[in-house]
């Protein structure tokens, strides 16, 4: 008779990836109610960089010491919008080289639309804008990609 294997993570604690919101806070405080709908969010990542330490007399290996945390850029995709506060920020950065950093909150929601996880990005600013290729066929929504660099990412307790 075999023993039942316990679930390591209960199914009720696993979440789907398509219920999320992106919230911009102009000046770090005022929420932007227009730029909240996105098709895709990528770049939620952080990496601890290390510096090798060579020990005297030890020629087989080095000791990796943590030196800093590096973050990937936050990339947001959505149907192209002609005018919005976020689009104006990107236009100012790309055309006039003027930057107005803002804070960004990405929130993952449960099936009941309650927050289950969140990531806070401080002092985010535009670094890249692009749109999908223009083509006569097939007829699809034109997707724009908005890429942001930021000072720090913080995982929020929900």
Image (spheres, rainbow, N blue to C red):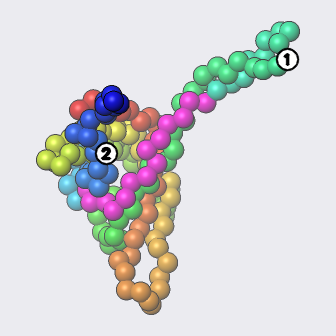
Percent from the top left, x then y, of residue 116? 24, 39
- 81, 109: nearer the viewer: 109
Quick one: label 1 or label 2, which is nearer the N terminus? 1
Q: Residue at x 31, y 60 (%)?
A: 38
Crowdedness of circle 2 by 10 Å Cα count: few (<14), some, many (20+)? many
Q: Are marks 1 and 2 in contact (CB under 8 Å)?
A: no
C-alpha gap between disc 1 and disc 2? 46 Å
Percent of width and height locating residue 69: 54, 30
Work out which residue is located at the far front of the displayed protein and give it: 1
Looking at the rendered structure, which numbered label has been put on residue 59?
A: 1
- Where's the C terminus, which quadrant? top left
* Residue 77: mark in rendering: none
Q: Which residue, given by chain and number where applicable, does mark 2 sit on?
A: 106
Residue at 38% across, 76% down = 142
What is the secondary structure assignment of the residue under circle 2?
A: strand
Find the residue positioned furthest to the top. 57
Tell whether position 37 is magenta: yes
Q: Secondary structure at mark 1?
A: loop
Residue 156 or residue 14, whichever sits in front: 14
Res 49 → quadrant: top right
- Residue furthest to the bottom in view is 136
| Residue 117 image point, x, y percent | 28, 38
**Looking at the picture, how far across and down is residue 79, in whole percent?**
34, 70
**Residue span colored magenta:** 36-49
């Amino acid at each position: 008779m075999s023993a039942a294997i316990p679930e390591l993570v209960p199914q009720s604690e696993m979440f789907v990836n398509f219920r999320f919101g992106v919230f911009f806070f102009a000046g770090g405080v005022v929420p932007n109610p227009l730029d909240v709908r996105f098709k895709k969010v990528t770049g939620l990542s952080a990496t601890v960089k290390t510096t090798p330490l060579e020990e005297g007399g030890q020629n087989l290996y080095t000791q990796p010491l943590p030196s800093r945390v590096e973050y990937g850029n936050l990339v947001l995709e959505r149907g192209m919008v002609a005018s919005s506060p976020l689009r104006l920020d990107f236009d100012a950065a790309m055309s006039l080289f003027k930057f107005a950093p803002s804070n960004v909150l990405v929130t993952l929601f449960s099936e009941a639309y309650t927050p289950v996880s969140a990531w806070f990005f401080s002092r985010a600013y535009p670094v890249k804008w692009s749109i999908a290729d223009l083509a006569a066929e097939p007829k699809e929504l034109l997707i724009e990609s908005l890429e942001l660099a930021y000072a720090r990412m913080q995982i929020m307790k929900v």
